Image: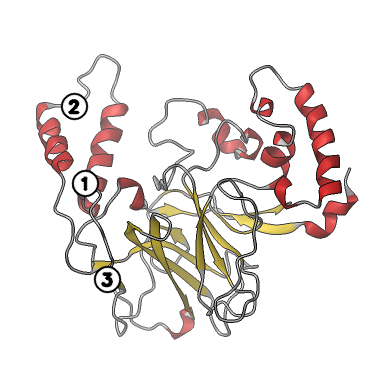
């Protein structure tokens, strides 16, 4: 339909995280890392300004999830929470003090080149590790991330009991361990990134698709909705691809070291899909996509960044140049 889009195609790898028990030598979301015993575990010195609510802990977040999953899956008519469970929930809700000491970073993702072959790596590296501080930081009110590039063949002895953060700000900043199921797809720019003439053509065509859609569908939102949500930018956790601009218009993000425009590296998503992009739901998940399933297949990692996406950008000249984060 639009030959002008062909040069703009990008390959992205959708990670399709699903709950599991990842091993340290595999790719995962929120799983154990190949971390050398000779290297100190990274921490964040803050600032971690209190937001008026108590903090929590990784252990309490996971305990609460376990209790809520069990309660939600009980037969109708049964007690939602037992008195003993309610006591535990009340204790967790009271929270913990905010940290005054440095906070150990939490593993977010470990990605092997064998699973994401188009992942741009420094020389000799074949593993990307992403960690974050589970507190909002003043720049954008999102977790601050850290990237590490490693060669798996050079790792002989790894840490088996990494330190846990003394506290976390939000339950959604604790990833639930997930295996990944990589799938390569082709993406195209969001409408706002298209040249004006092409965008107008796409809008007219997309409006025709909207006209034929069922009343109340997601395509009632805007003329470009069919193109944007069904065909251009894939939702969910993914590597590479195009940016899902939302809060801001598209703008270049220059590298702090060399000025080269940064490119999307990793999208950390609050949801794998929503009501606007059902065509991206994997076939094997469609039966559960609209049901009251616990855990929710659209939120396998249970990460939530205020319901939006945190994108990490890196420099195409050198992945070791400083990276940037963007909430979209």
Mark 3 secondary-structure assignment: loop
Give the residue drawn at x 29%, y 20%: 75
Residue 95 left/right relative to 2: left
Choose top left, top right, bottom left or bottom right for residue 77.
top left
Asked which secondary structure carries label 2, the reply is loop
Q: Residue at x 51, y 67 (%)?
A: 324
Q: Which of the marked residues, 2 or 1, is nearer the chain's N terminus?
A: 1
Q: Which mark is residue 81?
A: 2
- 109 on left or right of 234: left
Residue 43 lies left or right of residue 186; in this view the side is left
Reading the image, the residue beneath label 1 is 52
Residue tagged 3: 45
- Quadrant location of the N terminus in the rendered image: top right
C-beta proximity under 8 Å, tags 2 and 1? no
User: Where is residue 247 shown, x and y percent of the image?
Assistant: 55, 47
Q: Do the residues bearing badges 2 and 3 touch, measured as CB atoms within 8 Å? A: no
The answer to which of marks 2 and 3 sits earlier in the sequence is: 3
Camera-nearest label, 3 or 1 = 1
């Amino acid at each position: 339909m639009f030959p002008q889009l062909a040069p703009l195609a990008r390959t992205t790898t959708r990670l399709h995280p699903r709950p599991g028990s990842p091993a340290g030598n595999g790719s995962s979301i929120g799983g154990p890392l190949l971390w050398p015993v000779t290297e100190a575990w990274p921490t964040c010195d803050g600032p971690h300004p209190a937001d008026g609510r108590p903090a929590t802990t990784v252990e309490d977040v996971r305990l609460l999830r376990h209790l809520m999953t069990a309660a939600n899956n009980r037969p109708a008519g049964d007690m939602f929470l037992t008195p003993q469970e309610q006591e535990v929930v009340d204790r967790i809700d009271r929270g913990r003090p905010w940290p005054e000491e440095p906070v150990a970073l939490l593993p977010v993702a470990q990605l092997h080149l064998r699973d994401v072959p188009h992942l741009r790596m420094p020389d000799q590296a074949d593993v990307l590790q992403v960690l974050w501080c589970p507190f909002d930081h003043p720049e954008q009110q999102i977790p601050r991330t850290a990237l590490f590039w490693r060669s798996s063949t050079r790792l002989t002895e790894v840490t088996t009991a990494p330190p846990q953060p003394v506290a976390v700000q939000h339950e959604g900043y604790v990833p639930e361990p997930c295996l990944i199921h990589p799938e390569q797809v082709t993406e195209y720019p969001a409408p706002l990134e298209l040249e004006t003439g092409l965008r107008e053509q796409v809008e007219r065509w997309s409006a025709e698709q909207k006209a034929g859609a069922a009343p109340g569908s997601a395509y009632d939102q805007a003329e470009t909705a069919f193109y944007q949500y069904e065909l251009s930018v894939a939702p969910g956790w993914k590597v590479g691809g195009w940016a899902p601009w939302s809060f801001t218009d598209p703008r270049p993000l220059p590298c702090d070291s060399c000025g080269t425009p940064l490119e999307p590296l990793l999208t950390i998503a609050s949801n794998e899909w929503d009501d606007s992009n059902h065509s991206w739901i994997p076939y094997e998940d469609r039966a559960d996509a609209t049901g009251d399933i616990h855990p929710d297949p659209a939120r396998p990692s249970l990460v939530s960044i205020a319901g939006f996406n945190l994108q990490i950008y890196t420099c195409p000249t050198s992945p070791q140049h400083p990276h940037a984060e963007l909430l979209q």
